């Protein structure tokens, strides 16, 4: 009998899956437990909430894998997860990776490029034993093509329109309604008071769905930014033509952005198969935990 726990810790949400003898025994969802996205206090509370929704498994698990946003740039995320998850295991077998590293195993692949657009954005690839990344710098320095980037870009468009004496248009109506703001000044004030991505990325679908010409432009710019990340990883890997590309992340579920990204990546890498992830990323965490148990990771 094997007892495995997988965690997918994104910038907005954390998901867990407990698998016993290859059967799903329990699942749970909580707020983000990423220190980068949520800060240490909220991350610790989210992890406590998440584990509290599962059966008590203290000291009974064979292996745990957690994929966490920001783990490559914030070592204390790894420390927090190791400290909280190791006591759940029989032998201390805990694997901590960045959340992007869950995508390829979730897709059943050992080689390829995974591109994530959610709260943030990143591309990660594996080819003939090599691993490379592009993006994943966080909302202050990057995250082009992400939900946060789209909303911030939309706010900048609205500010530019006002500065030019132009009406806010449909984009203003869509974003103000989604954010519950009375006017542009209150929206800007809220953005500065709480600039963290988890507060703004959820409004990205409202921007992309808006009947405003800027929505189409932002969709295309986001898709091109994600294609650029993909091409960067492919070049760094020196991968052969035809390397598979898997698209994932909460925002990739948006059909308009998904279609635009498939088209942009296909144009940049015409021999590659480009497809959205069909299984949730937490499946990748379970597969990495199983690999750790069998000594393959």
Image (tube, helix red, strand yellow):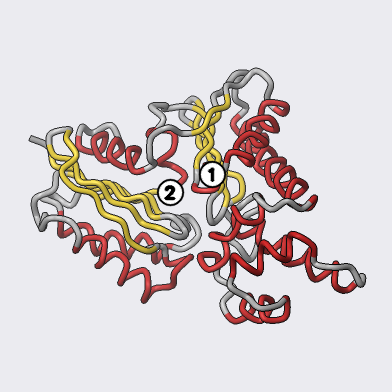
Residue 231: x %, y % from top left: 67, 34
Identify residue for label 1: 116
Horizontal arrangement in the rendering, residue 236 relative to residue 76 (left or right): right
Give the residue at x 15% y 60%: 87
Q: Nearer the viewer, residue 68 or 73?
A: 68
Question: On the rendered image, what quadrant is the C terminus found in?
Answer: top left
Q: Which badge, 1 or 2, comes first in the chain's sequence? A: 2
Residue 108: x %, y % from top left: 38, 27
Q: Is residue 187 above or below residue 105?
A: below
Q: Nearer the viewer, residue 164 or 104?
A: 164
| Nearer the camera: disc 1 or disc 2 | 1
Element assignment for label 2:
helix
> In which quarter of the view is residue 31 placed?
bottom left
Residue density around tag 1, few if under 14, some if 14–19, many if 20 or more, within 10 Å = many
Give the residue at x 51% y 65%: 198
Give the residue at x 64% y 79%: 192
Q: How many marks?
A: 2
Residue 228: x %, y % from top left: 70, 40
Label disc, if present, on residue 284 of the rendered structure: none
Residue density around tag 2, few if under 14, some if 14–19, many if 20 or more, within 10 Å = many
> In which quarter of the view is residue 188 placed?
bottom right
Question: On the rendered image, what quadrant is the N terminus found in?
Answer: top left
Element assignment for label 1:
strand
Q: Are marks 1 and 2 in contact (CB under 8 Å)?
A: yes
- What is the distance, in whole Å, between disc 1 and disc 2 at their CAs? 9 Å
Give the residue at x 65% y 61%: 151
Residue 222: x %, y % from top left: 69, 47
Label disc, if present, on residue 99 of the rendered structure: 2
Q: Nearer the viewer, residue 117 or 155?
A: 155
């Amino acid at each position: 009998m094997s007892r495995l726990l997988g965690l997918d810790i994104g910038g907005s949400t954390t998901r867990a899956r407990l698998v016993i003898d290859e059967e799903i025994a329990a699942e749970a969802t909580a707020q983000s437990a990423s220190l980068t996205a949520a800060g240490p206090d909220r991350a610790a509370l989210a992890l406590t909430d998440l584990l509290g929704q599962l059966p008590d498994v203290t000291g009974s698990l064979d292996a745990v894998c957690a994929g966490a946003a920001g783990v490559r740039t914030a070592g204390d995320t790894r420390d927090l997860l190791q400290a909280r998850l190791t006591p759940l295991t029989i032998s201390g077998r805990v694997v901590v990776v960045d959340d992007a590293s869950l995508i390829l195993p979730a897709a059943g692949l050992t080689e390829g490029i995974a591109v994530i657009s959610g709260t943030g954005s990143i591309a990660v690839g594996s080819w003939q034993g090599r691993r490379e990344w592009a993006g994943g710098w966080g909302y202050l320095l990057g995250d082009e093509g992400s939900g946060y980037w789209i909303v911030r870009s939309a706010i900048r468009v609205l500010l530019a329109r006002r500065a030019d004496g132009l009406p806010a248009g449909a984009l203003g109506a869509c974003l103000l309604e989604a954010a519950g703001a009375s006017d542009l000044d209150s929206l800007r004030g809220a953005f500065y008071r709480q600039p963290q991505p988890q507060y703004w990325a959820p409004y990205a679908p409202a921007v992309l769905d808006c009947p405003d010409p800027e929505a189409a432009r932002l969709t295309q710019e986001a898709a091109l930014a994600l294609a650029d990340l993909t091409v960067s990883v492919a070049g760094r890997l020196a991968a052969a033509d035809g390397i598979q590309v898997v698209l994932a992340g909460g925002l990739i579920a948006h059909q308009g952005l998904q279609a635009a990204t498939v088209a942009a990546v296909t144009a940049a890498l015409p021999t590659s198969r480009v497809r959205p992830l069909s299984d949730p990323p937490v499946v990748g965490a379970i597969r990495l935990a199983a690999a750790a148990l069998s000594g393959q990771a």
